[in-house]
Amino acid sequence: MQAAPVMTRPAAPAVEPQADASYLREAQALFAEYEKTLKQAEAFHARGNLEAAAAYAGLAAHLTLSPHAGIYASPRLERLLTDIGRRTAEPTSYKRPADPARKLQRILHVVTDVGPVGGLTNMLGNWIEQDKTRTHHIAATQHRGPAPASLQKAVDGAGGKFHFLNRTPGHQIAWARALRKLSQEFDAVVLHVYSQDAVPMIAFSEPDKHPPVLFLNHGDHLFWLGASISDVVINLRDAATDLSITRRGIAPERNVMVPTIVAPAVRTKSREEAKKLLGLAPDSIFLFSAARGIKYKTVDGVTFADPHVELLKRHPKAQLWVLGAGDRPDWAPAIEATGGRIKPMPESRDTKTLFEAADICVDSFPFVSSTSLMEAAGLGTPLVSRFYGPKAARIFAINHPGIDKPTLHGSTEAEYVANLERLISDPALRESKGREALESVLHYHTPPSWLSFIEKAYARAAELPPLDSKTVFGPNEVETFSHGEPDKRMYDVFGFSTSMDLLKAYPGLMPMPQRLELLGRLRREGVVKGVGETLRMLLPEWLVRRIKDR
């Protein structure tokens, strides 16, 4: 294939009025804080203090996530970090192979930090376990604690190793050098990193000095670093591809679709048995929803529970349980009106019986929970979701390959409630839609068919010419604040709350003068308290990890 031309991106969407004007003001203030921090990074870069520049660049990127700051990519940050990478690269005899038909056999997965549970951890573990014809290693740039047992087991089974870069002396530039050198032992690199991770940007700034890089777009609704170093971007759904092209500058041919891989669900109890364990009547109609609490945010005074009140009144055998919603005082009128048949519940890992008992899986709102729908579909449960926004904001809707088609979608509240009513009233429809969901999720999201998607991604990475990071963004291109779609919907969905706690991750990445300066600021603002926490932040991150993670 021909090298992709330098893209000309459309003008940033026009700023639109927001019902709550304070969101606009706060978002603009956050963008200003981001720019202030970016300028600090640029000043350190101009003075040759590249370690401090890298740390402040990561901090600037982090600010765009706390919450969204009106941008999805930053040409300035990417230029700065890739320049640091080029200026600090060590000589090497490595040359990327040029055979477009070669098989990418040895894979290095790069993570920032991975928890013992979670969607990112699960996908990585499933990927390694199912992609059995390859060798897989994991390199972590800022992981804290031991490797999660599930990932360690997967890597061991794949003949690989877990590499902890941040346990070696130095800061981000040293870790980037180590990552670049390590990558040269592999046929491809897959980035599963956090949005603000600067280490891969520095490591993979010169395409001839490392194998092809594939970026897993797991945070598709968020800003992230990596557009100018990723030979291929793996999108998990259609709307993510749209944003990758229009707002991140990824050339269309460098985007591929790979559905989320999930472990096939195995039913251990019949629906009736599971209902009995939960104390539900055999003839009850059990509507179940599961997600993190933030996904059930009240919008414009309308709670997640409110649209279901009249529906449940018409169907006295139906009830709705919402796992993850937590304590919701504003749901009280809806709960009372339905005689307690709407039940918000705290987050829990013990979900098996609830999913097995469900007659209908109800998606979270205003932000979808695709993983819950996939789990329910794997048990043959019909799916219902809703999204009331414009097409430009459909990153907040279900458009994932295996669950999009079988899901009953509501584009208005009336349509959403009507879909639920159809399923409640018609057992045969519940059966057929559940079967359709099961067949679809098995085809797209589980082996062996899932492997065909990842093979296409590997093949695309092998056949494309190396991406020149200098051509992705123009030399003078800058990011522009937007309050259009889907930007302003981020605040409607997630609210607007910032925390200075995110700064606590950065002193240990900085040279001592900047470490002391940032620590002083954190102490003045009350973020860091006590002698113990202060002493810990005086130490470089690599030493802390050596002490705590050995």
Image: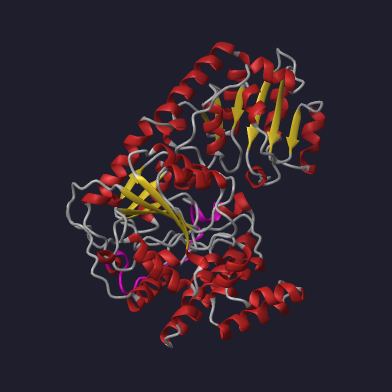
Quick one: quadrant of the C terminus? bottom right
* Colouring scheme applied when the structure was drawn: secondary structure
x 77%, y 74%: residue = 530
> Over which residues does the magenta segment extend?
471-489
Quick check: is 4 in the magenta stretch?
Answer: no
x 38%, y 76%: residue = 84
Q: Which residue in the rendered view is the most extreme toward the bottom?
A: 47
Residue 394 % position (x, y)? 47, 43
> Which one is in front, 47 or 35?
47
Side (left or right) of 201 relative to 531: left
Residue 546 % position (x, y)? 58, 67
> Which one is in front, 26 or 341?
341
- Above or below, 162 relative to 502: above
Q: Quadrant of residue 274?
A: top right
Q: Is residue 192 visible?
A: yes
Residue 316 % position (x, y)? 75, 18
> Which one is in front, 75 or 154?
154
Side (left or right) of 399 relative to 149: left
Total tally of numbered discs in the picture: 0
Q: In which quarter of the image is residue 80?
A: bottom left
Residue 532 % position (x, y)? 74, 73
Side (left or right) of 231 relative to 201: left
Q: Can residue 260 be seen in this view?
A: no
Quick check: is 487 in the magenta stretch?
Answer: yes
- Above or below, 409 relative to 133: above
x 65%, y 75%: residue = 537
Q: Quadrant of residue 76?
A: bottom left
Q: Main secondary structure of the magenta part?
A: loop
